[in-house]
Amino acid sequence: MINNLELTSNEAGELATAFLTEDLSIAPVDQEWFTVLSSKPMGESWYVVEIGIEGLPDKWVVQVYDTRECDPSYTFVSPVSAEDDHTDLAELPDEIATVLITERDARVA
């Protein structure tokens, strides 16, 4: 049976956020820190969803297909240097701060 329900921008954002927080092993209580920054349709078959932590410049870019599947090869983007002292993360839960530090450091590896 053909799925007549088209994927919406909001749904793509929700799917991407659920996928990312699961992939990063973020506890359910801390998942509210993740925010959809944008969800843009790319043609008729997929969306590019940008997810971030409010107040920080870092973001993950996840592709969500019309099949409601997320591409596991998402991208992390940050203007913050790996050598930064990470004081911008002081107010975050430890689990999220650790994920961000790991992602920032991985960009230079």
Image (spheres, grey):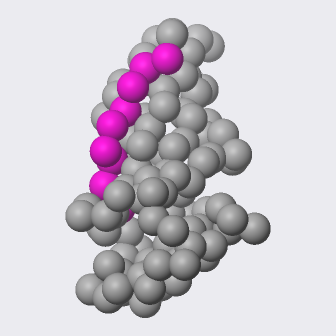
**Which of 98 and 106 lies nearest the eye of the viewer?**
106
Q: Is residue 32 above or below residue 29?
A: above
In this image, 72 relative to 26: left or right?
Answer: right
Which image quarter: residue 10?
A: top left
Q: Is residue 28 visible?
A: yes
Magenta residue check for 23: no
Q: Quadrant of residue 22?
A: bottom right
Left or right: 44, with 93 as reference point: right
Q: Would you say residue 27 is visible in this rendering?
A: no
Please report the residue visible at 31 percent of the width from the left and 45 percent of the height from the top.
37
Q: Is residue 64 above or below residue 79?
A: above
Query: On the rendered image, what quadrant is the C terminus found in?
Result: bottom right
Which is more toward the observer, 77 or 18? 77
Instruction: Please state the extent of the stretch shown in magenta in the rendering.
Output: 34-42
Residue displayed at 60% across by 48% down: 75
Where's residue 84, x and y in %?
Answer: 47, 78
Looking at the picture, how far across and down is residue 3, in whole percent? 53, 16
Asked whether 109 or 64 is in front, the reply is 109
Q: Main secondary structure of the magenta part?
A: strand
Q: Residue 64 placed where, x, y %?
A: 54, 33
Residue at the extreme right of the image, as rendered: 109
Residue drawn where x is 51% and y is 10% of the image: 43
Quadrant including the N terminus: top right
x%, y% of residue 41? 43, 20
Q: Is residue 38 magenta?
A: yes
- Quadrant of the image occupied by residue 65: top right
Whether residue 33 sits left or right of residue 99 in the image: it is: left
What's the residue at 54%, 42% (across, down)?
62
